[in-house]
Amino acid sequence: MAKAMPDTTRDAEWKGKLTEEQYEVTRCSATERPFSGKYWNHKGVGMYKCVCCGAGLFKSDTKFDSGTGWPSFWESVDKTKIKEVVDRAYGMERTEVRCAACDAHLGHLFDDGPTPTGQRYCINSASLDFEGKGGKP
């Protein structure tokens, strides 16, 4: 079976819309350096959204300090807003988290989070935008 060719038109649109780091993270599945993203220590009240399509993904009241240097959440806003994909890169098996609406790479899901879910969505800041309560950044 032939390998699907990338959609170069759509790729050019993403490159025009996103910063280089956002593009590398969301469209090429890169990972930003820990403690470098703008949201790893962010304390605002509101909604974290997909930087590519604007889908609401995580509420601020589910964010916690995991000590990892990336924004971490114990629950997504709605399981239908994200999709989980098996990631076997780097000789390990992990669960990759992607935006269900636009397929942007967000980060990974681990089972070492706090109660009530025991989950840790470890998300790249570069894949997120934040909308504060009342629409404030």
Image (cartoon, helix red, strand yellow):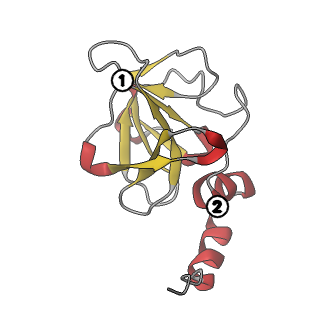
Contact between labelled residues 1 and 2, with CB atoms less than 8 Å apart: no
With respect to residue 125, does 68 lie above or below?
A: above
- Residue 25 badge: none
Residue 119 image offset from top left, x and y in percent:
37, 24
32 sits to left or right of 46:
right
Mark with earlier residue (2, 1): 2
Residue 80 image offset from top left, x and y in percent:
25, 50
Residue 99 image offset from top left, x and y in percent:
41, 53
- Circle 2 packing at 10 Å, graded few (<14), some (14-19), many (20+), is some
With respect to residue 130, does 86 lie above or below?
A: below
Q: Nearer the viewer, residue 60 or 35?
A: 35
Q: Nearer the viewer, residue 29 or 26?
A: 29
Q: Residue at x 66, y 43 (%)?
A: 90
Mark 2 — residue?
A: 18
61 sits to left or right of 49:
left
Q: Residue at x 35, y 46 (%)?
A: 56
| Residue type of the residue flagged with mark 1 | Thr
Q: Residue at x 49, y 26 (%)?
A: 72
Dot 1 falls on a residue whose secondary structure is helix
Mark 1 — residue?
A: 62
| Residue type of the residue flagged with mark 2 | Leu
